[in-house]
Amino acid sequence: MIENLETLLILARTGTMVEASTELRITQSAVSKRISSLERYYDRKLIQKKGRRVELTHHGRRLVDKIYPILSELRDLFIDEVTAKGHLVIGVSDAILSSWGPAIFHMVQDEMPDVKFVFHTHRTPVVLDRVRSGEFMVGVCTGSDRLDTDLQSEVLTLEPMVIIPSGLSPIKLPKKGDLGVITIEDYSGAWRSFRDEVSRLKIKREVSLESFFSVAQMAISGFGHGMVPIGVARTLKLDESILINLGAKGLHRPVRFVARKSTYSLPLVGKFYQSLSKKFKV
């Protein structure tokens, strides 16, 4: 029953069977069966189709409003047990864990040898939601904290954004007009954090993709200039002399540590944060 309720919560947030199944790592058919099981149990219609999307009915919304805090409290019951075993469940933005993140986390692990790190990687909005729900104890993600006042949030570093020239042929920022780029799409926490600065710098997003690494590879292949975090460019071992570093112009991707306020006070979480933050200050 609990997994069915959690499926309803995720479907309510994502709005589509496809996104819900991707996040849950199950088939769309399995998502549909879980929701149908809930509707039979409560004898109420909980969702309805609206074009290509799914929205909650009145009964579905009432149920979600009731079960969200309850499921969070249920997870809190076991946090002490998990920490007593020395486990730390960490949600990490995929662009971080696929670039410089593992090296940093390995250094922190060396300072906490008695702790078992359990990693999960998702897009930033998913990481934040799972931290809120108590599924992840902490998160390391990107983007602004302006909309996350319910979470404890600390900026670890500001990662410069860079432009990879199309086909790796060196360019300069134009003095007049906009520079068209390929970069991350609206759903990204990173984009929401710096989109105003992008406009200020006369950079125009012409194509959006779901992954910074996809952006980089498209730029390398000559499909257009790509704007990515410098960590992505370094992971791909690109020659930094051909990149346009936008950090000096104020364009960065914030990287931050997040946790629920009740979890943040746990000694294990506090030690992890202190060790992690020091790695960005050296």
Image (cartoon, grey):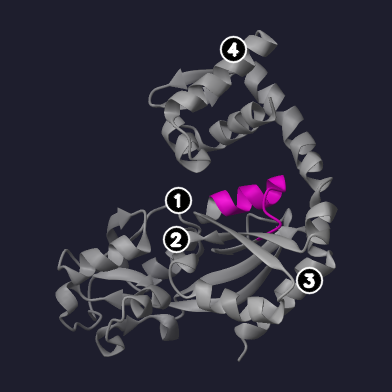
Q: Earlier in the sequence, mark 3 or mark 2?
A: 2
| Helix, strand or loop status at disc 1 | loop
Q: Is residue 187 above or below residue 162?
A: above
Q: Earlier in the sequence, mark 2 or mark 4?
A: 4
Q: Nearer the viewer, mark 3 or mark 4?
A: 3
Which residue position holds label 2? Answer: 191
Q: Whole-Å distance between the Cαs marked 3 and 2?
A: 29 Å
Name the spot of residue 158 as percent of width and height, x first.
53, 77
- Magenta part of the protein: which range? 126-138
| 127 magenta-colored | yes
Q: Are marks 2 and 4 in contact (CB under 8 Å)?
A: no
Give me the residue at 62% from left, 10% from top: 40
Q: Whole-Å distance between the Cαs marked 3 and 4?
A: 44 Å
Within 10 angstroms of label 3, few (less than 14), some, or many (20 or more) residues? few
- Which amino acid is tagged 4? Lys
| Helix, strand or loop status at disc 4 | loop
Q: Whole-Å distance between the Cαs marked 2 and 4?
A: 36 Å
Give me the residue at 49% from left, 26% from top: 30
Between 144 and 117, which is closer to the camera in this rendering?
117
Q: Whole-Å distance between the Cαs marked 1 and 3?
A: 30 Å
- Residue 45 image label: 4
Q: Are marks 1 and 2 in contact (CB under 8 Å)?
A: yes
| Helix, strand or loop status at disc 3 | helix
Q: Earlier in the sequence, mark 4 or mark 1?
A: 4
Give me the residue at 65% from left, 76% from top: 109
